[in-house]
Amino acid sequence: MKRSSTRGVGIVEVIVALIILSLAIPMVIGFSTTSKKVQVAANELENATAAAQAVIDSLALTPAFMVEQGTPKSKTVQGPIRMYDASWTYTPVGRHAGVVRVTVAWKQGNTPHSIVVAGEVP
């Protein structure tokens, strides 16, 4: 009589496979969650940078002496998702030009965030 050389899966192999899956699945879910948080943070920085650039562009249309002496030095800027608080400082570089440093701040949950963007104002 010939014996068949094929066997089924043993209980030990099934238990080992379940242990490996029980360790791997939470790690994959953790990577996915972390990836989403990083993506949201990068998107928020991109939107805040665009808001700061919009402030610099609007100040570039204003004569330098008015930017230097003008008030207010802050305003609320509408972004694609939220409102940002923007404030700026002006440093004269030449007779008719200067550098504007714009700080954009926002709150994400209970955590405050800010970004600083500098640009030249003719």
Image (tube, helix red, strand yellow):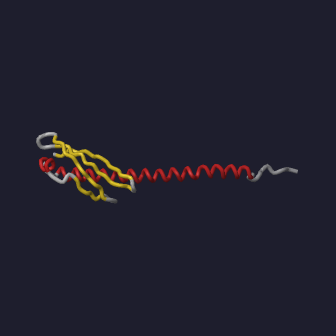
Question: Residue at the spot x=16%, y=42% of the render?
Answer: 92
Is 70 situated left or right of 20 in this image? left
* Residue 4 vs residue 76, the one in the foreground: 76
Q: Position of residue 27 (x, y in %)?
A: 55, 49
Which residue extends farthest front? 110
Q: Position of residue 103 (x, y in %)?
A: 27, 49
Q: Position of residue 110 (x, y in %)?
A: 39, 55
Which residue extends farthest top? 94
Question: Residue at the spot x=20%, y=43% of the render?
Answer: 99
* Residue 82 vs residue 70, the one in the foreground: 70
Question: Residue at the spot x=62%, y=52% of the render?
Answer: 22
Question: Residue at the spot x=11%, y=41% of the render?
Answer: 95
Q: Where, quadrant-wise, is the C terminus in this rendering?
A: top left
User: How many circles with numbers are drawn on the protein?
Assistant: 0
Is 94 situated left or right of 118 in this image? left
Is 89 situated left or right of 5 in this image? left
* Residue 4 vs residue 72, the one in the foreground: 72
Q: Specify the quadrant of the image occupied by residue 76.
A: bottom left
